Image (tube, rainbow, N blue to C red):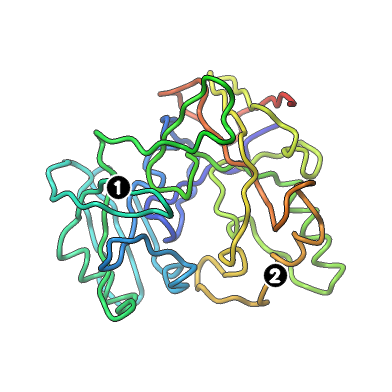
């Protein structure tokens, strides 16, 4: 198999950044979900609540995170420095510390996205000196992993063949194909059978990479939304079709992609075109 896409999503639920190469860290690809939007209660906010977040484009320069929106001048947030006020924020059931990016970022987000539940929005980043542990329910004996602001795991792996199979089923219903961007994966691979990833234990690469695939990714309404506009062209699709396909036998719901942790290869660089080998459970 080969890697066909590498993507990071520097700010949780804003637009992603496609890369030709990316550095591996235990928390995921470098800068993935390193920032997050929170409300006045310091709880995470995503496209589930604010579909318009899909309209905020993201760039990374050597010095800054840059956010862009058609209705405002770009916002630049310096990459350097962890000297910022600390807040206690919530991601699902997790409570963790975060660094506040300040009033300018908060004002910019509230300007382009609007007030949320009567309050404002803030931008926070994950502190370099903290860990957010991955749930242990699906890890193997002796394994530990941590991440930043993803829903739960540092990596999400998806397959081109699986997307093709899904789109074939959608076409049979007279529906338009959906792009891989709907699923917001970090690594996309090609060269396997559709949904073969369900049975993979690990992916090994030539640069020392070894990812452990530990939990199927249950999908939510975000996959119904265009990842440039936030619009849902066909309500409940492709969620409904994934449920019908039973892509994760024995599990109830819509599943696409596999959540993964880093087993080996910290500091290595992955590139589009790299070869990967899968081992089965």
Which residue is tagged 2? 237
> Which one is in front, 62 or 180?
180
Q: Is residue 162 above or below residue 43?
A: above
Mark 1 vs 2, N-terminal side: 1
**Image mark for residue 61:** 1
Lateral position of residue 238 relative to residue 174, left or right: left
Lateral position of residue 267 relative to residue 157, left or right: left
Q: Is residue 145 above or below residue 242?
A: above
Mark 1 or mark 2: which is in front?
2
Q: Quadrant of residue 37?
A: bottom left
Q: Where, quadrant-wise, is the C terminus in this rendering?
A: top right
Q: Where, quadrant-wise, is the N terminus in this rendering?
A: top right
Q: Quadrant of residue 243?
A: bottom right
- The residue positioned 81% from the left and 39% from the top of the image is 193
- Disc 1 vs disc 2: Cβ atoms closer than 8 Å? no
- The residue positioned 26% from the left and 54% from the top of the image is 124
Residue 35 percent coordinates (x, y): 32, 51
- The residue positioned 44% from the left and 60% from the top of the image is 13
Residue 151 percent coordinates (x, y): 47, 50
Identify the secondary structure beneath mark 1: loop
- The residue positioned 62% from the left and 40% from the top of the image is 215
Residue 107 percent coordinates (x, y): 20, 71
Lateral position of residue 86 relative to residue 210, left or right: left
């Amino acid at each position: 198999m080969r890697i066909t896409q590498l993507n990071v999503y520097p700010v949780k639920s804003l637009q992603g950044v496609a890369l030709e190469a990316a550095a591996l860290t235990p928390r995921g690809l470098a800068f993935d979900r390193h920032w997050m939007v929170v409300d006045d209660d310091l709880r995470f906010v995503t496209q589930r609540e604010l579909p318009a977040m899909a309209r905020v484009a993201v760039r990374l320069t050597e010095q800054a995170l840059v956010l862009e929106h058609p209705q405002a001048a770009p916002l630049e947030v310096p990459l350097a420095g962890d000297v910022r006020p600390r807040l206690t924020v919530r991601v699902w059931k997790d409570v963790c510390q975060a660094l506040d990016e300040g009033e300018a970022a908060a004002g910019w987000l509230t300007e382009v996205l609007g007030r949320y539940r009567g309050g404002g929005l803030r931008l926070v980043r994950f502190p370099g000196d903290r860990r957010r542990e991955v749930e242990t329910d699906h890890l193997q004996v002796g394994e530990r992993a941590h991440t930043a602001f993803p829903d739960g795991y540092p990596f999400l792996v998806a397959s081109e063949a699986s997307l093709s199979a899904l789109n074939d089923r959608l076409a049979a219903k007279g529906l338009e194909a959906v792009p891989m961007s709907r699923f917001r994966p970090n690594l996309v691979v090609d060269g396997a059978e559709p949904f073969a990833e369900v049975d993979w234990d690990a992916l090994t690469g030539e640069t020392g990479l070894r990812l452990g695939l530990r939990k199927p990714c249950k999908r939510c309404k975000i996959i119904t939304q265009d990842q440039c506009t936030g619009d849902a062209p066909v309500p409940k699709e492709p969620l409904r079709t994934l449920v019908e396909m039973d892509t994760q036998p024995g599990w109830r719901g819509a599943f696409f992609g596999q959540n993964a942790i880093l087993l080996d290869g910290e500091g290595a660089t992955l590139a589009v075109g790299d070869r990967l080998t899968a081992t089965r459970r």
